[in-house]
Image (cartoon, grey):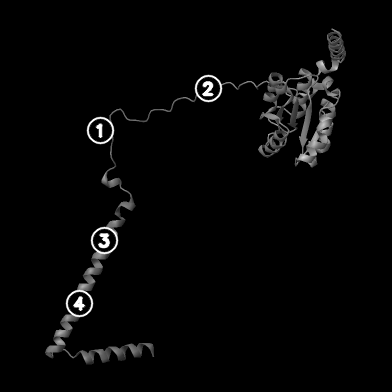
Amino acid sequence: MALGLDSGRRLSESTASFINNCSCVATSMTTEESNTALVVVGNPIIEGHLKRVLHKRGWSIDVCGDGDSAVDRYVQLRPALVFIALDIPTLDGHVAALEMREADSSARIVFVTSHGRKTIAEDAAYSSGAVGVLVTPITDSQVGEAWSDWHGTIPEAPGLSDLDALYPVLEDPEPEPPAFPMMPGLPPLPDTTPDDPTNVELPSASTASVADFKPQKKRSKVRWLVRLTVLFLLTGGSLGAAHYLGLVDLNGLIEEFRSTISSLFN
């Protein structure tokens, strides 16, 4: 009986200790919630490095390709960690992180950036109350050193007060200029087609131009050249025949012709 009373006393003390430690109840999460990370970096190589490092710690990742989908996915999934880059499609990483903090003040966000953009990422981390900045290339030791900080106290997000100012201002489109009035149409051209095409007068032969007779002149010249050539051949043939028959001495005639030519030039 004494043993039963003593056991009941110890059970009551342990129950009271659990109830008094209310912080354990408030921050407790299911295994699925505590081991899921949302990755929004827009780079397959960095996604692969994060997947490898987190899988070693027993975590799973959910990958999103743009800022708008990442915000919707965060509200649906409520992951324990968010790894996000600044340059992502549809919505800037800084604005997407602020929207996650606006939807859930306990969102733990880590900005992933290169060395060249580390300062900009640190400013965005301060504005959105991120728990850290992860500089690429990602290594196991780098994640191990920052792991406890990522699960520590979540900073305030001062950028939430300026969230509306971060969105681009859409200006009203300029009014289109008034359309010019239509120009009046040109009057139709006068109809020059004769009523009866069969009555069209053709130019007579007497009114033909001089150019019409040029081919005829060319033919006349050719005809005279042919005649002169034939005459020359007939004359030469006759003289040759006469010289052959002994009727005409061509040698004497040629010598006389030469002497005549020489006397003219001398």
Q: Quadrant of residue 122?
A: top right
Q: Nearer the viewer, residue 4 or 42?
A: 4
Image quarter hosting the C terminus: bottom left
Q: Is residue 29 left or right of residue 123?
A: left
Q: Nearer the viewer, mark 4 or mark 2?
A: 2
Q: Are marks 3 and 1 in contact (CB under 8 Å)?
A: no
Q: Earlier in the sequence, mark 1 or mark 4?
A: 1
| Residue picked out by circle 2 | 184
Q: Nearer the viewer, mark 2 or mark 3?
A: 2
Kind of residue indicated by mark 3: Arg
142 w.r.t. 232: above or below: above
Kind of residue indicated by mark 1: Thr
Q: Earlier in the sequence, mark 2 or mark 3?
A: 2
Q: Quadrant of residue 112?
A: top right
Cα distance in 3D space between marks 3 and 4: 21 Å
Question: Percent x, y for residue 255?
Answer: 26, 92
Q: Is residue 191 left or right of residue 84?
A: left
| Residue picked out by circle 4 | 233
- Report helix, strand or loop for mark 3: helix
Cα distance in 3D space between marks 1 and 4: 55 Å
Cα distance in 3D space between marks 2 and 1: 38 Å
Q: Which mark is residue 219?
A: 3
- Report helix, strand or loop for mark 1: helix
Q: Is residue 191 left or right of residue 39?
A: left
Q: Are marks 2 and 1 in contact (CB under 8 Å)?
A: no
| Residue picked out by circle 1 | 198
